[in-house]
Image: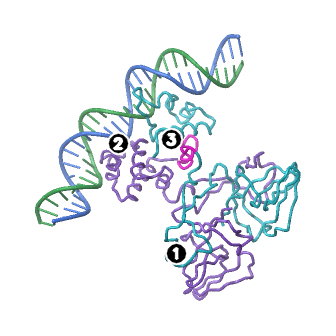
Chain colours: A purple, B cyan, C green, D blue
Amino acid sequence: MLSHADVWRGVDRLAEVNGLSPSGLARRAGLDPTTFNKSKRNTRDGRPRWPSTESLAKILDATQTTLGEFVSLVQPGTSVAARATIPCVRLSAAAVSQFDGAGFPQASFERIELSHLDARHLYALEIDRDDYAPVYRNGDTVLISPGVGVRRHDRVALMPKGGELRLGVLQRRTAERLTLMGLKDPEEVSAFAPADVSWLARIVWVSQ
Amino acid sequence: MLSHADVWRGVDRLAEVNGLSPSGLARRAGLDPTTFNKSKRNTRDGRPRWPSTESLAKILDATQTTLGEFVSLVQPGTSVAARATIPCVRLSAAAVSQFDGAGFPQASFERIELSHLDARHLYALEIDRDDYAPVYRNGDTVLISPGVGVRRHDRVALMPKGGELRLGVLQRRTAERLTLMGLKDPEEVSAFAPADVSWLARIVWVSQ
DNA sequence: CATGATATAGGATTAATAACCTCTTTTTTT
DNA sequence: AAAAAAAGAGGTTATTAATCCTATATCATG
């Protein structure tokens, strides 16, 4: 449910990311500087006041912001895509009768949210060799999120200080040592001294 | 620039995907049925009339639609998430100096869009066995998009009419025969008669 | 510290959208 | 085919956001 508070949060954040006050934002958009005053967001009898869609369009234009970008400012927390939910089917429970002719689930399944898709905290790593096939093939793109916590058995990217980027499965991480297992072969272990590691980050998505 | 026409397109599409007319949508949201009449979208002297933000909030609530989802209806074309871009690094070009202390790319790289993330056309398949390890491990979640085109070498899900869901790499697809290679071993080929296949759909993302 | 500019609270007025209403057209149901 | 319901055009009234205005508070600059 899109709330009054959501919309105003979006307006305030839009001002903030553009280094403006609410009144500065209004002014930039050619609106009256008092338009977005906090004091005017509810009427005297407490009824919420909503900024008009036309005013919103003007502030988006004045700050070169797309509506999609505005939505991520509206939401408290993560990005747009993180809010979308999709049906979820379990592999071993998947049966013909549960899908329609086009292959889409038609019964009511559990739904999951798409998480870790905040574009501000993601980057893509394009796989351009076959070192990591068949897990990651030449041409696959993996998404790495440096801010996300890393645990044992997570698939990770590790940047050594003196070498080249490595992908693997985190085996262990202590004060003295950090070990990765191979993506295709768990027996293939690589060890690193923490002081030689520039950073370690989790692979959160793979695009195929 | 968010335009008046964009917003009205969103309203019309929201009605349409919910099997409603504009007046039916207004009615469902508790608004007057004539609220969204085409005849009222411009004033007599040709000035554009914008629906209020409060009215939009009401129709989103009445149809259980998020603002993020509404944005994809507003845009002529693809979804919101498809609009987000993220930096992209090539594996063999990745060097320590290109990342900041937290592991985020700091030079200006090529940017790519996140594509195939339209929640309306996606579902998740949760891997709950190790049949497909190390490519897909128990606990991984793959996203399948039934509407997306499938080409040779794509990783796919195939639902046989009389069997259980299979994952593999599309090898060949003719009028007489459809063959999949194993995810981990390309030599492991499975053949299907097209008449025995309920549907074939591409795996577009993997969550790890 | 003084001055000027900006931000914000809050009141009054104006402009614009929602709500209400009537009628016509289109679609659906019987 | 006829009747009922829904959709849509368009006019009027009520409500609400924008605009204009004044005053106070806060911030930036010399």
**Label 3 crowd (10 A; few <14 / some 14-19 / many >=20):** some
Disc 1 is attached to a residue of which chain?
Answer: B
Q: Is residue A165 left or right of residue A106?
A: left
Q: Which residue is mark 1?
A: B98
**Which sits earlier in the primary sequence, circle 3 or circle 1?**
3
The disc label shown at residue A43, or none: 2
Residue A46, magenta (yes or no)? no
A181 w.r.t. C10: above or below: below
A39 w.r.t. B88: above or below: above
Question: Which stretch did the figure color magenta?
Answer: B58-76
Residue B68, magenta (yes or no)? yes
Q: Main secondary structure of the magenta part?
A: helix
In depth, the one of A139 and B158 nearer the eye is A139
Helix, strand or loop at mark 1? helix
Q: Residue at x 45, y 46 (%)?
A: B1
- Looking at the rendered structure, the kind of residue marked 2 is Thr
In depth, the one of B119 and B174 nearer the eye is B174
Helix, strand or loop at mark 3? helix
In depth, the one of A82 and B135 nearer the eye is B135
Helix, strand or loop at mark 2? loop
- Looking at the rendered structure, the kind of residue marked 1 is Gln
Q: Which residue is mark 3?
A: B6
Is the C terminus of chain B in the top left, top right, bottom left or bottom right quadrant? bottom right
Q: Residues under labels 3 and 1: Cα distance?
A: 40 Å
